[in-house]
């Protein structure tokens, strides 16, 4: 089933967002396999505005390091700035929102459901 469906978490603490970020690479690899993801920094990221919303390709093998370095360098602030991560086919897009929640959307409703029912996220969904 392919449709554009959005799911939201409740407002999360910084530590809850960080826990999702740490678990996300393994979850994506399990559900999607080896792939190249599209990542974008957004609102309130600590970058020049000209560098926001520019798609970057990040291999799943490098995603954990990319996310960790983005936080360590304070480019991305969990629950304080936006970052989106999308699968190559548009089946899943995860937006870490500056307001403290996580938005899950995309063209593959079955994939979104598997993510929302995962151990990583199921207790956080509204």
Image (cartoon, helix red, strand yellow):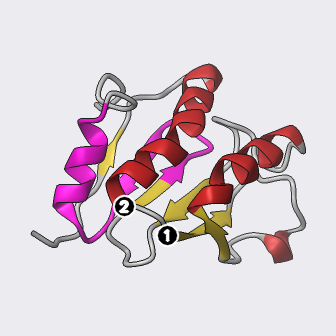
Residue 43 visible to the viewer: yes
Magenta range is: 95-118
Q: Residues within 10 Å of mark 2 (few under 14, many from 20)?
A: some
Q: Is residue 74 shown in magenta?
A: no
Q: Which mark is residue 93?
A: none
Quadrant in which the C terminus is drawn: top left
- Report the side of 58 relative to 20 (left or right): right
Q: Which residue is mark 2?
A: 32
Look at the picture and state if 17 lies above or below 123.
below
Q: Image point 68% across, 61% down: which residue?
A: 42
Q: Image point 31% across, 45% down: which residue?
A: 115
**Quarter holding residue 106:** bottom left
Q: Image point 36% across, 32% down: which residue?
A: 121
Q: Residue furthest left?
A: 1
| Image coordinates for residue 73, horizontal then vertical, percent | 90, 45
**Do the residues bearing badges 2 and 1 touch, measured as CB atoms within 8 Å?**
yes
| Image coordinates for residue 62, horizontal then vertical, percent | 68, 57
- Report the side of 43 relative to 32 (left or right): right
Look at the picture and state if 22 lies above or below 69.
above
Residue 57 or residue 54, whichever sits in front: 57
Q: Which residue is mark 1?
A: 35
| Image coordinates for residue 117, horizontal then vertical, percent | 23, 36
């Amino acid at each position: 089933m392919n449709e554009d469906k959005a799911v939201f978490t409740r407002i999360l603490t910084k530590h809850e967002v960080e826990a999702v970020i740490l678990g996300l690479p393994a979850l994506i690899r399990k559900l999607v396999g080896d792939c190249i993801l599209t990542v974008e920094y957004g609102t309130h990221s600590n970058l020049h505005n000209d560098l926001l919303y520019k798609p970057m390709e990040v291999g799943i093998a490098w995603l954990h390091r990319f996310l960790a370095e983005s936080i360590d360098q304070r480019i991305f602030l969990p629950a304080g700035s936006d970052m989106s991560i999308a699968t190559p086919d548009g089946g899943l897009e995860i937006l870490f929102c500056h307001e403290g929640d996580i938005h899950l959307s995309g063209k593959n409703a079955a994939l979104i459901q598997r993510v929302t029912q995962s151990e990583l996220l199921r207790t956080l969904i509204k």
